[in-house]
Amino acid sequence: MKREVSILFGLSGVGKTTMGRRVIDQETGIYHVSASDLLKAAHSQTGEELRTAQQDRLVENQQVLASALSEWPFPAGTRHILLDAHSVIDNDKVLVDIPVDAIASLKPSRLIFLTDDPAAIATRRLSGDRPRPVRTTSELNEHQERSLTVCRGYSEEMGVSLVVVKSGDLAGFRAALAI
């Protein structure tokens, strides 16, 4: 069964997991998985070990996403995969752009970029249950702009549509998913 793949991009703390869960709670046949979960399974490492890897290793890790996705045990009836991912990763030292070939290998039908006010992202990062880099709102704004620019590059290079949705806009998110 060929499954449609939508990739949901956005900064850590923007609400990708929350939005994904809200959609799958209302729809059947959609499965939400994070690139982090795929990579943790493929590399037998924690999310924090993967995120804080050296720049070259971090990029190398992304190259296994397509094979990890194809080996993931999706439930029967899964027709649409919502993959929660990053176009730029903050490894605590530098921002690392994820190469287009790692994203193209996933054969996405659409790209969605979730955005929010940097102050809201900073607040979520501080109140979350996993370690995330502490950044100023100015740094988060720059990171969000860079991440969106990288996603626009993916869209242009792959010829795949990109929709920008505000965090919390469930109707806009559902429309971007075409469900």
Image (tube, grey):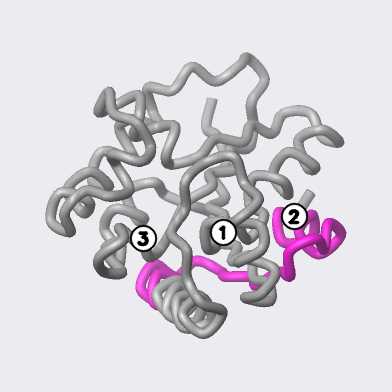
Q: What residue type is labelled 3?
A: Ile
Q: Position of residue 102 (x, y in %)?
A: 29, 53
| In front of the other: 115 or 122 | 122
**Sequence order check: which comes first, mark 3 or mark 1?**
3
Q: Identify the residue at horizontal 53%, vertical 44% (top origin).
A: 83
Q: Identify the residue at horizontal 42%, vertical 79% (top origin).
A: 146
In this picture, residue 5 sits left or right of residue 91 = right
Q: Residue 156: in sight, yes or no?
A: no
Vertical order, 142 against 163 (above or below): below
Query: In this view, which residue lies farthest toward the left?
Result: 56
Q: Residue 121: in sight, yes or no?
A: yes
Q: Let me know if residue 162 is in the magenta part.
A: yes
In this picture, residue 37 sits left or right of residue 81 = left
**Distance from label 3 to label 1 (Cα)?**
20 Å
Q: Which mark is residue 178?
A: 2
Q: Residue 89 carries which label?
A: 3
In this picture, residue 101 sits left or right of residue 130 = left
Disc 1 to disc 2: CB gap under 8 Å: yes
Q: Position of residue 10 (x, y in %)?
A: 55, 62
In this picture, residue 101 sits left or right of residue 139 = left
Magenta segment = 153-177
| In front of the other: 39 or 154 | 39
**Distance from label 1 to label 2 (Cα)?**
9 Å
Q: Which mark is residue 110?
A: 1
Vertical order, 123 against 82 (above or below): below
